[in-house]
Amino acid sequence: MAKGIGNDEGIQYICKLIYEAYRVPVLWVDEAAAPRLALGPAALNRPSVQGTGGLPVEVMELVRADPSAEAAAPALPRLYATGFLENFIILQLPGAGGAIVIGPALNAPVTGDNAASLLRDHNIPPGQQASWLEYYGNLPIISRKRWYHAALLLYTLVTGQALSVTELLLAAGPLAEPLHPADDSPDLDLSYRREHTWLHHDPMQEREMFRYITNGDKAGLLRTHASFAEESYGRLSRKSQLRSKKNLAVSSITLATRAAIEGGLFWEIAYTLSDFHIQYIEELRDIPAVDSAMLAALCDFADQVEGSRSARHSRISDRCRNYIYNHLYEELPLGRLAEYAGMSASYLSQLFKKETGTAISDYIQQQRVEEAKRLIQLPGITLSDIATRLHFNDQSYFTKVFKKYTGLTPRQFKQHSR
């Protein structure tokens, strides 16, 4: 075996070390994919899919089918993700050593509506969804960066050699060549469009349209949008014109999101708007509705930028305001903001007050009251819950601060909002 592997005890030690470091299921399997060591119960509790339980069959097939199993040295770690979002690391050991399999793990939680829609995509019967939700709830959550580090650490422990992230991600070799049917190749489509002068829009025209979003100029946006010819959009789906329109809308909203952030819109607002508009468009069932919704989304971004431009300040103040917006449900001491801004607390306090006319503590209170106003109008949330979530000391202090900025108590505001 290669330097770094040692004997069976050495492999067992490596497996235990990975398990202790990341708390992710670790399997050492032989060349027939039979377990020799299993650490972590979650690996054995996967709900059945098409009659198969335990680990996904495709993972075991990768272990058995990998040609490197008989090589003199271990292959590079293989990163594999299933259609159910489970992540695995597979490292073939040389000779008849079998393989080490790390996983399953998730890069982000899969809960609630996201889990339900994912299971529907895989035609999982409603009666089995509860077991899948329980399964997802038991899986460890590891960021993508940390997951890569686990693969690098495993390789180093087994081989005694270093491996870079780039080498890891390129381990699968060059990307497959795109498939183009003989009667539908890019060259043929390009020839046809040029012959009939159905050319794509000038990129400067596209840049101009999104520049209007960056500037918060809805009128200019509408003028430029009206100048786009229908045939200039191209075809983004071979099988469905509706799907093509939706793909166009998604790409346009993505560009609009970036343009709005460049224009000063808080990025969390911009990304949330993007999610909302894309989700809405995905539910539409006819092309005119998609066209209308896409234009409405672009105008929404321009309006949001225009609404935020009146409060434009220095980059430092904008970064702090954006940070406060994103972390409003957490404690926000001045020292934390100063560390984020990279300056002393006293200087940040002076700069913020000079540019906004408001002390940072007062600004945070104002934003929490604005958030409370939105929450009060939602069903199923009590006033005490809102006070706790937004870090007011108690109900009476929440009432005092809320009335200071609105002239009403939270209860009065709720009654007036009905």
Image (cartoon, rainbow, N blue to C red):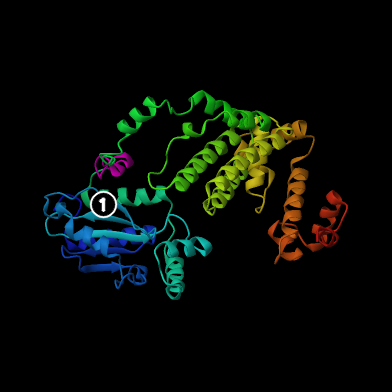
Query: Residue 175 in magenta?
Result: yes
Look at 52% across and 42% down and name the residue there. Answer: 249
Q: Seen in the image, is 119 located left or right of residue 11?
A: right
Quarter placement of the C terminus: bottom right
Q: Kindly give the residue lying farthest to the bottom in the view shown.
A: 127
Q: Nearer the viewer, residue 244 or 397?
A: 244
> Start and end of the magenta stretch?
163-176
Residue 394: image location, x then y, percent: 77, 62
Count all numbered tags in the image, as a single digit: 1
Look at 43% across and 54% down and name the residue there. Answer: 107
Label 1 environment density (alpha carbons within 10 Å; few <14, some 14–19, many ≥20): many
Q: Kindly give the residue lying farthest to the right in the view shown.
A: 407
Q: Seen in the image, is 101 located left or right of residue 208?
A: left
Residue 377: image location, x then y, percent: 75, 59
Secondary structure under tag 1 reads helix
Q: Which residue is mark 1?
A: 157
Q: Seen in the image, is 206 located left or right of residue 118?
A: right
- The type of residue carrying mark 1 is Leu
Our reading of the magenta stretch's main secondary structure is loop
Look at 59% across and 36% down and name the residue there. Answer: 261
Query: Residue 5 in magenta?
Result: no
Q: Seen in the image, is 383 located left or right of residue 330?
A: right
